[in-house]
Image (spheres, rainbow, N blue to C red):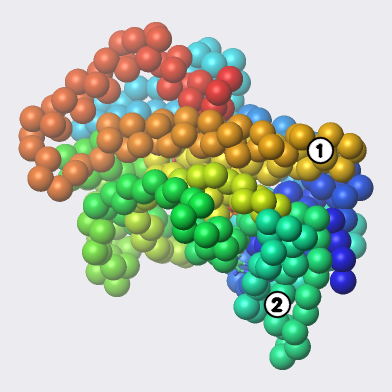
Amino acid sequence: MKTQVVVIGGGPAGLLLARLLMQNGIATVLLERRSRAHVLSRIRAGVLEWGSVETLRRAGVGTRMDGEGEIHHGVALGHTNHQFRIDFAERAGRAVMVYGQTEITKDLYTAHDAAGSTIIDNAEDVTLHDVTGRPRVTWHKDGRSHEIEADFVAGCDGFHGVSRQTIPADARTEYERVFPFGWLGILSETPPVSHELIYSNHARGFALASMRNPHLSRYYVQVPADDTVEGWSDERFWDELRRRLPHDAAEAIVTGPSIEKSIALLRSFVCEPMRWGNLFLAGDAAHIVPPTGAKGLNLAIGDVALLAELMSAHFAGDTAALATYSDRALERVWAAIRFSVSLTGLLHRFPGQSAFEQRLQEAELAQIERSDSAQTTFARNYTGLLT
Ligand code: APR
Ligand code: PHB
């Protein structure tokens, strides 16, 4: 078997890349380790920068997002018993779209099915060969071995994937900071406490009020890194959330049973370079950001939009195009890491942090509330990077 681009991983990065390449007439085969049902059962991010919205529309998968997604023109930051709003339209002249990653993934699969794309799920033991020459990829499925040859391999297989590990250890540099806490998140079929997101700093730890739609709330509270979901009954979660959100919001929370509950550790990770020969990394395979800035999914979309453009230029005859991929992608990645790490530092309680540091965080939030330029910087970073 032969194709032009083998895409490893059927998360949003891989599915969108295959879609954008196909629109430009480039043949792709996508290999996904898990079943489609498993991929579609994962609850992940929910906030799209405007550039991501436009990329999804351009990929022909914007219809349901435009119908069911919610445009948010601002966000609230708070601490203890005070919150204030940052107006995106006024400060940055653009908005964000709240639409779940799970729904985007569903829309991408639907578009691929309609176009007859080659997506192979339950592909086991995916292995990359000769990526600095003429790449080949092998895998097992239903007890049989398979092999395909390609011009390029796109490693879109997430943080635990095989693609990044294919780059020899002495040819890549990995930068990492693991935070000593996680986010406990729940999904609940209740109306969200506010029509916009609330990010709250509290002496007991950070809390976030988010949503998927007007009937589906997504809430998070910061927890120690070694906490387990078993220790968190729904009742305990709601009590803790109520304590940590600004007073007026806390009073308005509508509680109900959780339909999903999980803990994710906070981590920043970058692998450089994002290209090794004819292997290109994109999305979580190359980088992880702490979720505080809602950048993970947007970075993945940004990577594959750039990669699709450069691969298309390559196949149209511009063989130098792909040489710029890694540096251009990494510039945006580090901008996102910088924003997400600084917002994490502003809003979370760190082990050993004293009341002094808590007051400093509150003073910094007050400074953002007073400062036009600080609000503009926040709004620009939150709604889109490097623009
Ligand atoms: N072979 C084939 N597929 C693999 C392999 C492998 N060895 N390892 C992992 N995969 C698949 C996973 O099963 C998953 O479906 O690769 C996919 C990677 O998808 P994601 O983890 O969702 O990563 P990505 O597509 O880069 O999405 C970006 O943004 O909101 C953030 O972290 C969040 O998932 C989100 C990410
Ligand atoms: C979410 O709704 O899952 C969400 C929103 C904003 C974030 C992180 C996660 O910063």
The residue nearer to you, when weighing 279 against 193, is 279
* Label located before the other in sequence (2 or 1): 2
Quadrant of image for the N terminus:
bottom right
Q: Residue at x 91, y 47 (%)?
A: 25
Task: Locate residue 119: give its quadrant.
Answer: bottom right
Label 2 residue near ligand 1, CB within 8 Å: yes
Is disc 2 placed on a helix, strand or loop? strand
> What amino acid type should be assigned to the residue bearing mark 1?
Thr
Q: Residue at x 80, y 50 (%)?
A: 19
Is disc 1 placed on a helix, strand or loop? loop
Q: Spatial distance from mark 2 to mark 1, Cα to Cα?
A: 29 Å
Q: Is residue 321 visible?
A: yes
Q: Residue at x 69, y 37 (%)?
A: 323
Q: Which residue is mark 1?
A: 319
**Mark 2 and mark 1 residues within 8 Å of each other at the beta carbon:** no
Q: Which residue is mark 2?
A: 139
> What amino acid type should be assigned to the residue bearing mark 2?
Trp
